[in-house]
Each structure stands twice: as structure tokens, then as C-alpha cells.
């Protein structure tokens, strides 16, 4: 009965399978260099072969945590909160983001967009994946589009995804870390020929921070 009650609260978004939370510098995209508190939520079935947090995939490995505790921890460190995963939209993000906004915190999300968009967000980073594409409504709401480039064919995918976004969405190409030496020159050349795109790097990895 207790387990059933916990799972009901997880389904409602009152509790979330918390993998980790930490204070660091945002390393990617538009807000790179900004101090931010990261909330990493477990659970993802998108299944990217190059994912660097595969331990986040199985939500059952991560303890259901009351969002009030998560918000209390987050509010101690920064006014910018980044919710990531895993795939955070696996869960209802409205209770968490409502509680964060009550603390006057800025809410950012990093998502594949593969599930219904829930929550109140100041910034939406949409990072689509080929094997589980975003749902249509998120394209119009995304503030930035971040395409991970593993090979040259990902540039075709990038253009297909960019064509679906709103006119204000900032477009980023980011080298997949394990092949960065190979694909970074490809991205640089592509951005110079197609300046609507920008280069995003995982600067936190160069800085050797979380």
C-alpha cells in the first residue's frame, strides 16, 4: 500500500525519481557560463546509443523524492534551475516548476520533446533524437534547438528539425563528445556556410566540472 501511494505521487509529479542534483556552471547552449542548479530526473526510453548518462534510464534505480525537498535544496544555491535527465517530460513537471516559480526561480528544461510538455518554463532547450521524435507542440515553444552531431547525416536531421521550430528559436549544432575531434571541423565548416546555426560545445567537460 505504501509503495502504491508513492507511485501515485510520482505519477502526479509530487514526487520524482531523483538521480542527482548539483550546483555547477551551465556548459552548453545559450546559457553556457551561467551558474545553475541542476536537477537530474531518472527515467528515459529514448535510448541514444551515445548517451553519457545511461544510468539515468531506469527510473526504478532512483529514489522517489518529494519535490518540496528538491525545491528547498535548489533555492539555496542559484536563481537558475535546470531540469534534465533522463527525459524529464516522462513525468508531470507542473508541480515542481510551480513550486520553483513560487520561490521566484528561473526554470530551464533540457528535453528531447518526446513526451507532452508539462510545467512552467522560462527556457526550453529542445534536443530532438531520431529514434523518438518530439511531439509537435513543443517546436513552437522551444527557445533553443540543440542537435547533437555524431556524423554528417545528423546535419540533414538538423535542418529537418529546424524547419519545424518557431522563428525565434536559436539553432545550435553540438559535437558528440566521443567523436568531437572528427565532427567539430565539420560543424565549424557547416556553420560558416549556414550562419543561422551556432556552435555549442560541452564546455563543462573542458573545464572538468559536472
Image (cartoon, helix red, strand yellow):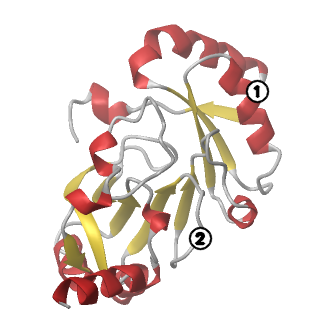
In-image side of 90 versus 198 (left or right):
left
Residue located 78% across and 34% down the image:
159
Residue ID at (47%, 82%):
94
* Residue 126 to residue 201: above or below: below
Element class at badge 1? helix
Give the Cα distance between marks 2 and 1: 25 Å
Residue placed at 27% from the left, 44% from the top? 55
In the rendered image, the quadrant that contains the N terminus is bottom left
* Res. 66 image quadrant: bottom left
Q: Position of residue 24 (x, y in %)?
A: 23, 50
Circles 2 and 1: CB atoms closer than 8 Å: no
Residue 203 position, x and y percent, is 36, 32
The residue closer to the viewer here, 33 or 49, is: 49
Q: Is residue 105 left or right of residue 108?
A: left
Which comes sooner in the sequence, label 2 or label 1?
2
Q: Would you place residue 34 above or below residue 174 in this image?
A: below
Quarter residue 73 falls in: bottom left
Which residue occupies the foreground of this view, 31 or 180?
180
Q: Which residue is mark 2?
A: 117
Q: Nearer the viewer, residue 61 or 73?
A: 61
Residue of label 1: 156
Amino acid at each position: 500500500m505504501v509503495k502504491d501511494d508513492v507511485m501515485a505521487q510520482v505519477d502526479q509529479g509530487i514526487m520524482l525519481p531523483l538521480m542527482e542534483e548539483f550546483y555547477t556552471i551551465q556548459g552548453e547552449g545559450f546559457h553556457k557560463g551561467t551558474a545553475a542548479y541542476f536537477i537530474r530526473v531518472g527515467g528515459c526510453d529514448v535510448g541514444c546509443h551515445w548517451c553519457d548518462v545511461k544510468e539515468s534510464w531506469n527510473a526504478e534505480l532512483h529514489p522517489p523524492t518529494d519535490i518540496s525537498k528538491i525545491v528547498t535544496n535548489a533555492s539555496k544555491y542559484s536563481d537558475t534551475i535546470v531540469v534534465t535527465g533522463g527525459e524529464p517530460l516522462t513525468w508531470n513537471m507542473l508541480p515542481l516548476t510551480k513550486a520553483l516559480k513560487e520561490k521566484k526561480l528561473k526554470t530551464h528544461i533540457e528535453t528531447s520533446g518526446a513526451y507532452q510538455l508539462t510545467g512552467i518554463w522560462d527556457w526550453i532547450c529542445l534536443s530532438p533524437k531520431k529514434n523518438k521524435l518530439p511531439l509537435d507542440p513543443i517546436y513552437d515553444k522551444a527557445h533553443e534547438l540543440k542537435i547533437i552531431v555524431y556524423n554528417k547525416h545528423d546535419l540533414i536531421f538538423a535542418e529537418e528539425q529546424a524547419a519545424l521550430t518557431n522563428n525565434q528559436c536559436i539553432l545550435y549544432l553540438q559535437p558528440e563528445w566521443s567523436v568531437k575531434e572528427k565532427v567539430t571541423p565539420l560543424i565549424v565548416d557547416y556553420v560558416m556556410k549556414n550562419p543561422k546555426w551556432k556552435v555549442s560545445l560541452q564546455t563543462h567537460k573542458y573545464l572538468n566540472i559536472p
